[in-house]
Amino acid sequence: MQVASIFPTAIGIDTVNNLSPSEHKHLISYESHTIVNAGNKITENNYLLDDPELSNLKTVLESKLQKYFFEIFKTQSATPYITQSWLNFTYQKDFHHEHNHPNSFLSGVFYLHAVNNDKIFFHRHNESMFEFEPEEFNLFNSHKWWIPVKTNDVIFFPSRLNHEVGVNETEECRISLAFNTFVKGEFGSVKNLKRLKI
């Protein structure tokens, strides 16, 4: 029997290969300017990509974001752009709690330093009235799925999607740059009374 997958959740996976030494140094300098988050530490500055020193990185990330957006929505009438951005520092025994990103359309994570066997977990909340105990997990019956990541990877996903990072069992610090986005342009159909311009 053929089984079709309809209405899938699109996760974008790409790589940033052109981070300059000066950009890397600027980002790492924020390690001493962090606050405690639920399970790890984040930068006090949550508009990092507005720093002039990171303008090239912001351009690269927004270019990849726009490519991801177009692959999903197939429209040129609107453009996503980065709003907030911050660094996560996940030390040994730290983790990143399950959460999503309200007031954001799409979100992204750029892995400045991934640790051994690193991954990001995504959650799907139960939409069925019934739950069974599967003998084997797959994309249809799982409520949690992970994607492996490595240094210089960038992941894009819908902001409403719950996600988390497991406990860092290594002695290295896991460093990721997270960002939220919104969209500007024209949405919907005039004929169907759904037109919106932002």
Image (cartoon, rainbow, N blue to C red):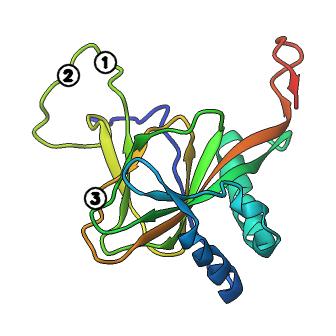
- In front: 28, or 1? 28
Viewer-nearest of labels 2 and 3? 3
Viewer-nearest of labels 1 and 3? 3
In the image, what residue occupies the spot 26% across and 43% down? Answer: 138
| For residue 186, side relative to residue 82 (left or right) | right
Q: Residues within 10 Å of mark 1 (few under 14, many from 20)?
A: few
Residue corresponding to mark 3: 167
| For residue 56, side relative to residue 21 (left or right) | right
- In front: 123, or 130? 123
Callout 1 secondary element: loop
Examine the image and state in which quarter residue 174 appears.
Answer: bottom left
| Rendering coords of residue 162 (x, y %) | 44, 38
Q: Amino acid at mark 2?
A: Glu
State yes or no: discs 2 and 3 in contact (Cβ < 8 Å). no
In the rendered image, the quadrant that contains the N terminus is top left
**150 vs 160: above or below:** below
Distance, label 2 to label 3, CA atoms, is 27 Å
Distance, label 1 to label 3, CA atoms, is 30 Å
Residue corresponding to mark 2: 131
Q: Amino acid at mark 1?
A: Ser
State yes or no: discs 2 and 1 in contact (Cβ < 8 Å). yes
Distance, label 2 to label 1, CA atoms, is 7 Å
In the rendered image, the quadrant that contains the C terminus is top right
| Rendering coords of residue 99 (x, y %) | 44, 39
Whichever of callouts 2 and 3 sits on the residue coming sooner in the sequence is 2
Q: Residues within 10 Å of mark 2 (few under 14, many from 20)?
A: few
Residue 128 marker: 1
| Rendering coords of residue 142 (x, y %) | 27, 38
| Rendering coords of residue 189 (x, y %) | 84, 21
